[in-house]
Amino acid sequence: MKTALITGASGGIGSATVIEYLKNGYFVIGQYNSGKERIDALKSQLREQGLLDYFFAIKSDFSDNAQTLDMCKTLQKSFKHIDALVLNAGAGLYKLFTDTTDTEWQNLLNVNLTSAVMISKQFLPEMISRKSGNIVFVSSVWGQKGASMEVCYSATKSALIGLTKALAKEVAPSGVRVNCVCPGFIDTPINSRLSKEDVQSIVEEIPLGRVGTPEEVAKLIYLLTDKTSAYITGAEITIDGGWTL
């Protein structure tokens, strides 16, 4: 049985991705931090679907690099290999760039970028030795286009795109593929701060005329680690209903 590690598993996209991999026969490790209630709800859903025995949740605070490394070491002791890394964990910050504190910046950097780098470095050697493995980084359309009031967030997400392209070139000869997805406006809890009027205003800008679903993003992530996408690496794939065209 193949094994997938999905970070940010308590979020909307993360939970949907956990379910997608489980339905496709994977054993799934789901990392979370503050979302214990959402992880418990996910477990209840998986129990009803007969999938809970193939799911293992692990808590780790990625704002603390030491905890990120400890998680990797713990998993390496328990699992022989990881076939798919889905590095989806992320933190947001809606604030003027000039008002952002050094602590806030460091937190965003650690959660959104450094954790992805550290985890990849820990699990890549085994993938390279097997000449098999997939990594998917979850960026954002703001990593491509940038967003006012989300400058630091945009910077960390943009870095994931650069990481994808460079790392894909480096490990392709070893049979490991690296890709990146850039979601647009998706129906997740992170957007709950928006009013109905705000949501409607955004939807009017989207050519497909609706909000995206976490399940749609999850299916794209899974596709990029499936054998049917064996000739795709270094890709930066936007999933936004045409919003940023």
Image: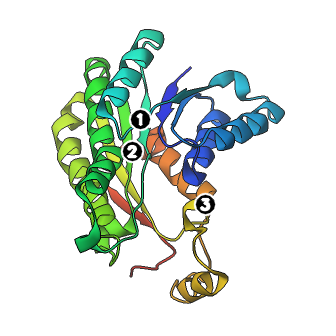
Give the residue at x 37% y 28%.
67
Where's the N terminus, which quadrant? Answer: top right
As helix, strand or loop, the secondary structure at mark 1 comes to strand
Residue at the disc numbered 1? 85
Indicate whether 195 appears above or below 2. Answer: below
CA–CA distance in space, label 3 to label 1 = 23 Å
Indicate whether 233 appears above or below 76. Answer: below
Residue at the disc numbered 2? 136
Amino acid, disc 2: Val
- Asked whether, in this view, residue 86 is left or right of residue 126, the answer is right
Give the residue at x 51% y 53%.
220
Where's the C terminus, which quadrant? Answer: bottom left
Amino acid, disc 3: Pro
Q: Residue 94 location, x and y as percent?
A: 40, 69
| Label number found at residue 189 | 3
First-in-chain label (1 vs 2):
1
Graded by Cα atoms within 10 Å as few (under 14), some (14 to 19) or many (20 or more), the crowding at tag 1 reads many
CA–CA distance in space, label 2 to label 3 = 22 Å
CA–CA distance in space, label 1 to label 2 = 6 Å
